[in-house]
Image (cartoon, rainbow, N blue to C red):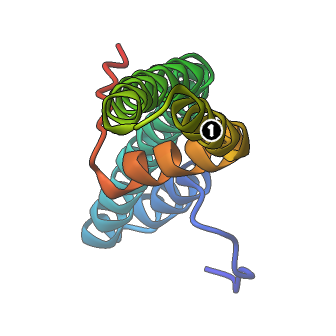
Amino acid sequence: MEYQEYKPSDPEYLNKLAADYKTEGRDETSKDIYAASDTIKEQKIKMDNLEKQTNDLKEQLEAAKSYQEKLSDVFEPLVANLFNSKIDEFITGKLANEIDLAIDDSDTISEAVNDIEDLRGQLDGFEIDGDQIADTVRQMISDGDISVRLDVG
């Protein structure tokens, strides 16, 4: 048999090589080469399947990311609004109570009016930072204080 240059492990090439060895009467070597060819074919099929599975998983991951972004777009404003409304309720209730106490404790109506003006000034100075609330909600989600379960199917 003549010298042949190296070729990649191509099953068709190996089958041809095995046939050449068989023709030369080297049956055992021929069988080994046929077996190697079959193994390479099987491994290529497995690799193709793994590549397909990998691509499927990448697609599912992208779908999950997209779904998570959509959930964030929906839930972040809802949570921020809920948070804002609860803070407003708390502040309003606390201020109403403080105003009632100020009126009860005042010796004169003018003192009560002054106390109310002071409380209104404090309320005007109180601001709710929506960006800070959104950052806090994101942090709560990433810390696991708020969890979102995704079923991708």
Q: At 57% from the left edge and 32% from the top edge, which residue is drawn?
A: 116
Q: Image point 47% across, 25% down: which residue?
A: 79
**Residue 123, quarter of the rendered image:** top right
**Measured along the vertical axis of the image, is residue 67 above or below residue 110?**
above
Secondary-structure class at tag 1 = helix
Q: Residue furthest bottom?
A: 3
> Which is nearer the eye, 5 or 22?
5
Q: Label 1: how many residues lie within 10 Å, few (<14), some (14-19) or many (20+)?
A: few
> Residue 151, percent across and down?
31, 19
Along the line of sight, which residue is nearer the eye, 32 or 39?
39
Tell me where residue 63 appears, x and y as whole percent: 55, 24
Above or below: residue 147 compared with residue 30? above
Quarter of the figure that contains the N terminus? bottom right
Which residue carries the number 1 mark? 114
- Rendered location of residue 98, percent (x, y): 38, 35
Q: Amino acid at mark 1?
A: Asn
Which of the 4 quarters of the picture holds residue 106?
A: top left
Please indicate whether residue 87 sits to the left or right of residue 121 in the image: left
In the picture provided, is 28 more to the left or to the right than 66? left
Image position of 114 with respect to 72: above or below: below
Q: Which residue is rendered at x = 49% and y = 25% of the image?
A: 88
Q: Position of residue 137 (x, y in %)?
A: 48, 43
The answer to which image quadrant residue 111 occupies is top right
- Give 132 or 124, whichever is nearer the viewer: 124
Q: Residue at x 37, y 19 (%)?
A: 152
